[in-house]
């Protein structure tokens, strides 16, 4: 009887969270899945069209470019922000720089600022009438100078990637710094006494100790990268042409501007599938890494 | 004892709630309450005239209470689309006459105002006010004014300094480029970071120059093709403007605001922009500079058949929810509001704040700002054609705008752009249904 009461209590306590989860996560996903097979015209569903939305999206060069841009954002997040976050956290933790509190604050600052403000700030600097452009025109005497990378089909994403790296590294740094402080100092001291190099300490002590956090951060980075929207929208709105389009922007355009809810839903399902697939991949890598360290 | 106290407290609370509710009803009196959702930023200087109209309406109709929610830009449309999807729209709302508000006017949620507007009221407005709206071609709102989308502003002080005058032809404009550049200035400022700009402010005007006033409508309906000469030639002019260095460097990275600032700071001789920029000029520029600004249409193009045109579309007004039709008091109040806002009283107030209303007023009685007067003269001088992106479907226009921007950056050519666009329109555009 006490067992039954305990189980009932568990389920009762779980129920509100479960209902909310079903309502705001699972239901919309299933709803989108259903809608992704429909065609819409003039705000009305005109019928089921099977996989046509998916085939059109995958055949669309703009979507493929958007997906590639999202992959670039994901790569800069997982292979840029996280390693740099670990490195900065380690530097601050080992107190290799004077005024560590000041640097901690300065590095953390970008993540506290709204992405829209950051986008405007960078635009003010690098736009054709921005401070940097004006300065270069002045010192070079070239009145036609503009930052051409923004117009490059191949490299237009680079300024966005740099801003994302600058903005989000700080968040990971703080997460890693908090977790580094949980590693007893005696471990670092013992390693140094044994003559371990800093690289050995990082790869043999720090990274294994932070593996859980690195995994969690990777999941956050992947899911965040795939739904990138605010900074890109405010900085370039996907342009020029569609060189900086991302999947969320493509979804937004088709759903809210062209009112093609079927196509928009299909994009959202593709994002969910990509997200789940990539996170599963990271989980697999993490499991292998854990086995190796154990 | 505890039970008794609990019961007494509960009774007291219940009674107070009942009385409170009663008092609220009594306080309301016979006020008609309308909910409203407006795409307006009341804190912005641009809407000072709107705020004044709202105050005047409240003073004249104290029995009508408007509970207004304001939103601006895309945020307005996003929320309104959600409301429309759930069929729960407010009693009054900002409404466009075309595709921008299709989610509310083409879905049966907006009231057709035609039966409620008699000829004596309509006769006071410019005739273009009453052009059909939406796919049903009826009236969902009374346009308070018109959005003129093409104008070229010239800084005549700079032109005089350079020994130039406003060019009569495109060739003359191109010939001015080396002179202007030699003086360390840019010829034309235009912010095409958002690629709709080149479409709204140039393409429609150019197409009509080559094809005549109704060519856009014919092509939209499939009676002409976008691969025909008028469209291709119009795109060619835009390509030539880019190739011949008319625009400031980085035109496709430059926002509207940045282009305006470049012109305001007298770094460029011409500005291509919409005519509504006059109100910002009146607010931001000294009188001497405004006096030196000439407001014209684009110079004549080689081979053009139609001359001296700009293009315009009716500006957004206020629509009434179809559901209001069943409540006479609410319907009367809502109609009073839309008629007041666009009618004589509202128009007079808005004119004082720099707007040129669709209601025919004797504007000589008003003390108008410098650029506002120039805008009135501009509207009276040039004929107004169709705004291309107000006619065609948004998805195709987006495709076209992107191709135009790519062409301005050196990729693509007018004929291939025309072919791609015609193929899209033939397959998808609702005008060809």
Image (cartoon, helix red, strand yellow):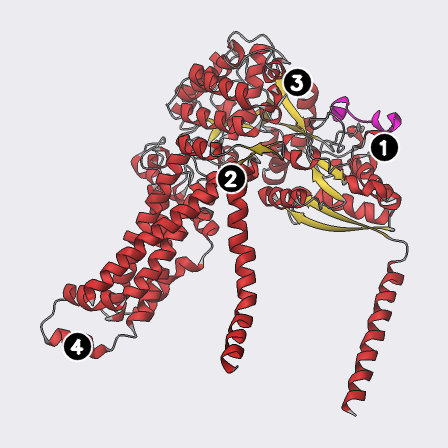
Part of the protein shown in magenta: B116-131
Q: Who's the residue at 53% across and 81% down the image?
A: A1
Label 4: how many residues lie within 10 Å, few (<14), some (14-19) or many (20+)?
few
Are labels 2 and 1 assigned to the same chain?
no
Q: Position of residue B270 (x, y in %)?
A: 51, 26
Horizontally, is A143 left or right of A84 in the view?
A: right
| Rendering quarter of residue B133 | top right
Q: Earlier in the sequence, mark 4 or mark 2?
A: 2
Q: Position of residue A292 (x, y in %)?
A: 19, 63
Parent chain of label 4: A
Q: Position of residue A215 (x, y in %)?
A: 32, 60
Parent chain of label 1: B
| Rendering quarter of residue B72 | top right
Parent chain of label 2: A
Residue bearing the label numbered 4: A189
Q: CA distance from mark 2 to mark 1?
A: 42 Å
Residue bearing the label numbered 2: A36
Q: Earlier in the sequence, mark 3 or mark 1?
A: 1
Res B211 seen here? yes
Nearest to viewer (mark 2 / mark 1): 2
> In terms of depth relative to the viewer, which is nearer, B211 or B300?
B211
Residue bearing the label numbered 1: B116
Horizontally, is A169 left or right of B187 in the view?
A: left
Q: CA distance from mark 4 to mark 3?
A: 83 Å
Horizontally, is A207 left or right of B279 in the view?
A: left
Label placed on residue B382 = 3
> In terms of depth relative to the viewer, which is nearer, B126 or B73?
B73
Res B39 seen here? no
């Amino acid at each position: 009887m006490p067992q039954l009461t305990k189980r009932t209590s568990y389920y009762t306590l779980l129920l509100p969270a479960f209902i909310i989860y079903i309502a705001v996560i699972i239901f919309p996903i299933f709803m989108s899945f259903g809608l992704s097979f429909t065609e819409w015209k003039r705000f009305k569903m005109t019928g089921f069209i099977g996989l046509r939305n998916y085939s059109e999206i995958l055949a669309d060069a703009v979507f493929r470019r958007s997906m590639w841009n999202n992959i670039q954002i994901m790569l800069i997040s997982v292979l840029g922000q996280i390693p740099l976050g670990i490195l900065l956290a380690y530097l601050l933790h080992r107190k290799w720089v004077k005024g560590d509190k000041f640097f901690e604050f300065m590095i953390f600052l970008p993540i506290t600022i709204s992405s829209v403000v950051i986008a405007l700030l960078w635009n003010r600097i690098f736009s054709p009438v921005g401070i940097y452009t004006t300065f270069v025109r002045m010192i070079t005497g070239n009145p036609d100078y503009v930052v051409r990378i923004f117009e490059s089909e191949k490299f237009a994403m680079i300024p966005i990637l740099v801003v994302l790296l600058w903005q989000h590294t700080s968040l990971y740094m703080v997460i890693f710094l908090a977790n580094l402080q949980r590693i007893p100092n005696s471990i670092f001291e013992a390693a140094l006494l044994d003559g371990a190099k800093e690289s050995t300490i990082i790869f043999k002590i720090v990274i294994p100790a932070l593996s859980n956090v690195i995994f969690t951060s990777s999941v956050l980075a992947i899911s965040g990268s795939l739904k990138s929207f605010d900074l890109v929208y405010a900085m370039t709105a996907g342009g020029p042409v569609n060189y900086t389009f991302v999947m969320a922007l493509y979804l937004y355009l088709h759903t809210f501007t062209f009112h093609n809810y079927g196509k928009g839903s299909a994009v959202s399902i593709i994002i969910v599938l990509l997200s789940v697939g990539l996170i599963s991949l990271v989980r697999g890598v993490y499991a292998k890494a854990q086995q190796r360290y154990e | 004892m505890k039970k008794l106290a609990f019961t007494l407290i509960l009774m007291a609370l219940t009674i107070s709630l009942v009385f409170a509710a009663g008092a609220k009803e009594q306080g309301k009196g016979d006020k008609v309450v309308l909910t409203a959702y407006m795409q307006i930023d009341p804190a912005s200087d641009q809407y000072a005239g709107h705020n004044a109209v709202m105050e005047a309406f409240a003073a004249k109709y104290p029995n009508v209470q408007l509970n207004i929610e304001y939103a601006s830009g895309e945020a307005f449309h996003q929320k309104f689309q959600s409301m429309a999807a759930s069929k729960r729209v407010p009693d009054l709302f900002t409404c466009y006459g075309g595709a921008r508000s299709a989610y509310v006017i083409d879905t049966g949620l907006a009231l057709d105002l035609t039966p409620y507007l008699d000829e004596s009221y309509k006769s006071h407005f410019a005739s273009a006010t009453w052009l059909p709206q939406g796919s049903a071609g009826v009236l969902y709102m009374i346009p308070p004014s018109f959005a003129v989308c093409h104008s070229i502003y010239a800084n005549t002080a700079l032109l005089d300094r350079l020994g130039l005058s406003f060019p009569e032809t495109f060739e003359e404009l191109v010939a001015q480029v080396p002179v202007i550049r030699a003086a360390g200035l840019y010829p034309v400022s235009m912010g095409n970071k958002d690629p709709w700009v080149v479409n709204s402010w140039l393409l429609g005007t150019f197409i009509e120059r080559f094809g005549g006033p109704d060519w856009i409508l014919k092509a939209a309906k499939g009676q002409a093709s976008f691969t025909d000469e008028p469209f291709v030639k119009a795109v060619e002019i835009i390509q030539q403007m880019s190739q011949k260095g008319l625009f400031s460097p980085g035109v496709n990275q430059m926002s509207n605001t940045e282009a305006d600032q470049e012109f305001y700071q007298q770094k460029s001789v011409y500005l291509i922009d919409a005519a509504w920029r006059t109100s910002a000029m009146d607010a931001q520029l000294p009188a001497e500079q405004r006096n030196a600004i000439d407001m014209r249409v684009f110079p004549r193009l080689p081979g053009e058949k139609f001359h001296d045109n700009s293009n315009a579309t009716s500006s957004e007004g206020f629509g009434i929810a179809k559901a209001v039709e069943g409540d006479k008091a609410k319907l009367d109040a809502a109609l009073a509001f839309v008629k007041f806002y666009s009618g004589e009283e509202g128009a007079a107030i808005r004119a004082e704040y720099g707007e040129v209303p669709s209601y025919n007023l004797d504007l000589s009685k008003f003390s108008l700002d410098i650029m506002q007067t120039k805008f009135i003269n501009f509207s009276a001088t040039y004929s107004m054609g169709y705004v291309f992106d107000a006619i065609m479907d948004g998805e195709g226009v987006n495709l076209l705008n992107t191709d135009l921007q790519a062409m301005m950056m050196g990729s693509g050519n007018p004929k291939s752009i025309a072919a791609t666009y015609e193929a899209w329109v033939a397959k998808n555009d609702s005008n060809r249904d």
